Image: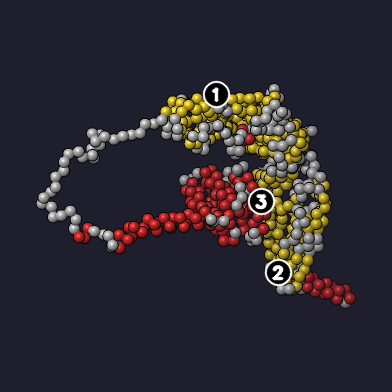
Amino acid sequence: MKRIGIFILFLCWIQLGFGQKTIESSVSANHVAANERFTFEIVINNFDCDVMLPNFGGLEVVGGPYQSQSDGATYVNGKSIRVIEVKWTYELRAKEKGTYTISGVTMNCSGDEQFSAPIEILVSEASETPNVDKDSYVLLSTSKNKVYQGEPFTVTLKYYSKDKPESFEQLDLGGAVGIFREDLKPDRKIFQTVPENIDGVRFYTIILREEVCFAESSGELTIDPYYVSALFRRDFFNQYRKESNSNSLKINVKEIPRKTAPDFKGLVGDFQIDGEISRNQFLTGDVIDIKITINGVGNFHDLESLDLKIPKSFEQYEPEILNETVITEEGFKGKIEYNFVVIPKEGGNYTIPSYTLQYFDLKSQKMKTAKTQEFKIHVDQRDGIKSSPESDPKVITDIQYIEEQSDGFFEQEDFIFGTWTYYGMVSSPLLLSFFFIFFKRKKENLSEDDLLLIQQKKAIKNAQEALKEVQQYLDQGNDAAALKGLQSTINKFFMQKLNVGLSDLSQRSIANRLTTENVSATSIEKFNKIWNAIEMGQYAPIAHENLVQTVNDTQGLLIELDKTL
């Protein structure tokens, strides 16, 4: 009897436990390296309570929140009890070593508050060796670890795995302060899998990314670890994910000696410059075309706008720039043309001085100078155009006779002086001028906030117009153009709505901003799903029906965000 009583009490305790509202938070690891990702989870067992987000204590949110739900039932003492579990998952990382504390999560259930325990995270220095497990790892390597400022070097991200990955879900670049990076093969769609034998162990290897980098400052620069999430097939119905962080890289950058080159603007490589002028003899008001062409290979992206010394009496326009460079392992290679248009206003003899280009030659490791020829121009004053009676058929020189049978030159109704028509004609120019000045000044006096508001209101309209074009590509079966257009549409929408530049756009930065703007977790999850689908489309083809669904989801999401932001 005693044992039966204890068993009944135990069942009652279980039933009571299922009826309680609980909250719990946990992490996948509490001791990590700098830039290493880990997950933070919040789990509750009900829908009726409000959950307040914790303070992450300086940790960076790089993914999420991702919401999942499980709904089931259990039988206790012959009664069915519903069991609900809701989970939110965040991906976090720390950029620097130290101790970080994630505060407890608060759950408010009609005034009754519950708290999860705070969690302490110990972060050590970022490793210069990859985060290796026995089955897979990611290696970041460089062609040079000692370079001059502005000298190109390549960085390669290579994936190693004993099992062949089915696809790659996500790739995030590590931070690289003071380094300009350019994808060496931005249009690559196929990633070749190559078997390699490493210390007697067979691995599948895949080069995921090759970058050409340029150091923008001297000293020791760091490229932080890259993050890769790969999907593997366990069997026909099941997939599993493996997440990896690469090693970091240290690059020692030497400063360029520029004592003998006071006009040096940072160009490094091998360059030639040439100048052309349409002709040397002109009349005032003629258009003069001047073309400056710079050929070569190097850090063309650091080339500043050219400042030709044009005479003050010439009218000058912004040059048309034609960039015909491509990225190679040696840097940007090709030419850039600057087409200047100037118009002389006064006659005389003029000289446009030669343009001098100074650059650091890597082969000789010396400063070199290239220059155009100077342009000498002679301008004659254009004569005025005079018309003569003989040349103008409208000029009448013969005597004109008065028509005697005319009823009169004017009738009474021909006079409009003093009528409403007269006053309207007299006042209309003044009224039009008034309204023109009023609206012009109103536009000029708009504050930055007003201009930003106008830009944000246009964002959804521009996005909807762009999505119509994407839909046309889909109807034509041109999925590649549709995917490219979809990516461009999302980028432009967030650039206008969040007032950021293209270089500041990333999945992580947008998700963080949406969280700051109190966008719902459901909308953020939709955004992450769409962004991941587009990113995956860069690596592997997307089924047409899946792309159609992604476009539809994007249209719905942008409408939701337009109402919230």
Tell me which corner region of the image, top left, top right, bottom left or bottom right, holds residue 253.
top right
Residue at 88% of width from left, 77% of height from top?
A: 1
Q: What x and y, as percent, mark residue 425?
A: 32, 57
Look at 71% across and 28% down and name the residue there. 259
Q: Amino acid at mark 1?
A: Gln
> In which quadrant of the rendered view does residue 168 lie?
top right
> Where 84 sits versus 366, above or below?
below
User: Is there any visible trace of residue 155 in the rendered image?
Assistant: no
Residue annotated with mark 3: 509
Q: Which residue is mark 2?
A: 49
Give the spatial CA distance, label 3 vs label 2. 29 Å
Amino acid on which the number 2 mark rests in the picture: Cys
Q: Which residue is mark 1?
A: 373
How far is the residue under mark 1 from the one under mark 3? 49 Å
Q: Earlier in the sequence, mark 2 or mark 1?
A: 2
**Mark 3 against mark 2, which lies toward the viewer?**
3
Residue at the location (46% across, 26% down)? 378
Residue that lies at the very extreme toward the left in this rendered image: 405
Q: Are marks 2 and 1 in contact (CB under 8 Å)?
A: no
Mark nearer the viewer, 2 or 1: 1
